[in-house]
Image (cartoon, rainbow, N blue to C red):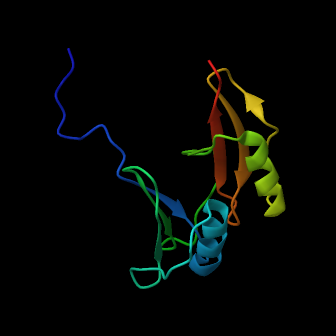
């Protein structure tokens, strides 16, 4: 039997911990092709506009964090080859080759704070 929950099965916002909000805002804005704007919340939060309901924010409120572990979310792409070329042009070191796991192809990399990130492309059915 499933118990009803008042918690909705939806993600509202993902927070990425960063140490230098200005550097990270510039890096993520370039990564996602977004214009730069100013941080909020006393210069500790930087909201990145997203498509869809889930929001994305850089969070400099806890500068002493451990980025260890796997990526906690991923970005979508429709062109993995162009994505990998773009990442290399940005000077990003890839943590993996393009991997095909059946449902998606993916590549992993890290941001300037060593946070693990991933981009996925749906596999053709």
How far across and how far down the image is residue 93, in percent? 82, 55
When the figure is inspected, residue 62 is found, relative to residue 50, above or below; the finding is: below
How far across and how far down the image is residue 88, in percent? 83, 56
Q: Quadrant of the N terminus?
A: top left
When the figure is inspected, residue 103 is found, relative to residue 75, above or below; the finding is: above
- Front residue of 42/125: it is 125
How far across and how far down the image is residue 86, in percent? 77, 56
The residue located at (83%, 61%) in the rendering is 89
* Residue 81 horizontal side relative to residue 74, left or right: right
* Residue 54 horizontal side relative to residue 91, left or right: left
Task: Work out whether residue 58 can be spotted.
Answer: yes
Task: Work out whether residue 94 can be spotted.
Answer: no
* Residue 17 horizontal side relative to residue 3, left or right: right
The residue located at (78%, 42%) in the rendering is 81
Q: How many marks?
A: 0
Q: Quadrant of the C terminus?
A: top right
Quadrant of the rendered structure where residue 55 is? Answer: bottom left
- Front residue of 4/109: it is 109
When the figure is inspected, residue 39 is found, relative to residue 105, above or below; the finding is: below
The residue located at (60%, 69%) in the rendering is 29
């Amino acid at each position: 039997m499933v118990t009803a929950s008042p918690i909705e099965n939806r993600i509202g916002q993902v927070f990425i911990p960063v140490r230098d909000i200005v550097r990270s805002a510039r890096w993520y804005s370039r990564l996602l092709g977004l214009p730069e704007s100013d941080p909020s919340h006393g210069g500790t939060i930087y909201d990145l506009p997203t498509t869809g309901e889930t929001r994305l924010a850089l969070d400099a409120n806890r500068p002493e964090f451990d980025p260890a572990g796997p990526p906690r979310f991923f970005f979508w792409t429709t062109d993995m080859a162009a994505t990998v070329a773009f990442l290399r042009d940005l000077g990003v070191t890839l943590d993996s080759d393009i991997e095909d796991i059946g449902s998606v192809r993916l590549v992993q990399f890290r941001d300037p704070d060593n946070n693990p990130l991933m981009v996925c492309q749906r596999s053709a059915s």
